Amino acid sequence: MQRKIIVSIILIGSFLTLGAGLATLLVVTKPQPHKVEQNHAPLLVSAVTVNPQTIIEPIVGYATARADRYARLSAQVAGEIVEIVNNLKIGDKVKKGQPLIHIDTKEYEHILARAKSTLEAIKAQKAQLDVEEQNLNRLISIAKNEMAIAEREYERVKNLHSRDMAPRREYDLAHLAFERTRRELQSLENSKALLPEKRAQLAANIINSQAEVKLAQLNLNRCTIAAPFNGKVNNLHVEVGEHVSMGRELLTILDPGIIEVPIELPASVRPRVKVGTKCMLTVDSIEGATWTGYVKRIGPSASESTRTFELFVEVDNTKQTHELIPGYFVRATIEGPTLENVMIVPRGSIQQNHVFVHQEGKAYSRNIIVKRNLRERSIVAGLDQGSVIITSNLDALYEGAPVRLGGSTGKLEGKTAINSERDSITEMK
């Protein structure tokens, strides 16, 4: 039994050894496959050639146009609207000083007449006081003469009485006559002394009455609402027969000749704008319409909450092909500073502060510094003159990737702020 087991083990070992040898022989004698080197086709890309150039940097903002002169005309007196002159309508032209609306004047005419009557009465009192003063002056002069005569008579009788040459009764009568004339003179002088106070009171009353007359006349004049300047009726809020209270808005007028556009810009661009700079205005919904304006004023401070400042552009409608209408939401492109010898690349070609350049059929990465972003382009540093910047298939590129240019290489030309505002616009962020 043991012998059979030993024989079986020997046979199994022999078979295993034979199988391993055959497997090794097959591996060694297996033919090797032919190696073929794979070549990747160059990637088709677009590119632009960049060179130093000089541009006028445009600065863009958005705002709502408004009339430079705009007036809300309100009732300054209460009353009934008795006339809207010439059946005035919205859009009608008006001239400075032209009557527009009449409020009933009857009540204010009565008030003015009463004020004038009171003034005339006070003036009459003043004239009467002048006559009274003249009469007092005459009476004082007479009283002084009478007192002088009475005084001389009294002194004569007194002298005679002291020498017992005149009776006591004659002395007393002379003394009484002298005292009477003196008292009369004193009374007249006292009356004259009161005249300045009466005159001052009358003068104050005259001033008050004159003010009342002026106020009454002013309120009467206010019954006619007139145009403060040449313009057009923008809104009309009342009708004939309507009773209005003081302060009620009646109509609005604007002058469409001069339009003002208040624009909010980031405080960061404040050093790059100045008064007198040219500005082009457009409305996105109106194709082909443009207006030319100029920076008229610049706000002296910036908002603490938004970090923006206001800049005001003025548009003279008389010099435009089409009128800029108040209320339009406009896009304003302001000429900024002139940037000389700058390198500009398409903004979409920049990936994490590097771009791919084309050299001898391959793409190579170049680190750049973005100095300023325009709307679709960027001003950068770090590129050589004549660099060919790849602008397409950027996600498929890698260092040394084979590429071929599709068509002719374009050139990125410099443009002014006005002609290229759709391409080169400082972002308002």
Image: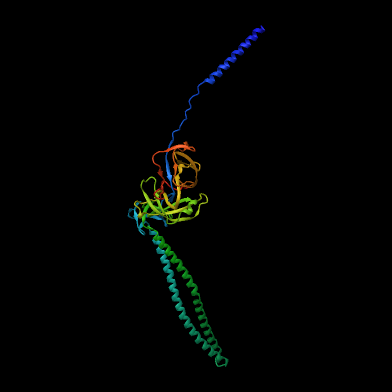
Question: How many numbered circles does the render carry?
Answer: 0
In terms of image quadrants, where is residue 230?
Answer: bottom left
Residue at point 49%, 41% (across, down): 365
Q: Position of residue 87 (x, y in %)?
A: 33, 53
Q: How is the image coloured?
A: rainbow
Give the camera-side residue of 240 and 183. 240
Q: Position of residue 288 (x, y in %)?
A: 36, 47
**Residue 186 seen in render:** yes
For the N terminus, which image quadrant? top right
**Residue 226 seen in render:** no
Q: Is residue 149 above or below residue 259?
A: below
Give the camera-side residue of 342 and 17. 17
Residue at point 47%, 55% (across, down): 299
In terms of image quadrants, where is residue 104?
Answer: bottom left
Give the camera-side residue of 167 and 182. 182
Give the camera-side residue of 28 and 419. 28
In terms of image quadrants, where is residue 408?
Answer: top left
Q: Position of residue 20 (x, y in %)?
A: 58, 17
Q: Position of residue 99 (x, y in %)?
A: 35, 58
**Which residue ends up furthest to the right in the rendered image?**
2
**Which residue ends up furthest to the left in the rendered image?**
86
Q: Left or right: where does residue 5 sit relative to residue 220?
A: right
Q: Is residue 100 above or below residue 164?
A: above
Q: Left or right: where does residue 19 sit relative to residue 126?
A: right
Q: Left or right: where does residue 151 sit relative to residue 276?
A: right
Q: Is residue 48 above or below residue 175?
A: above
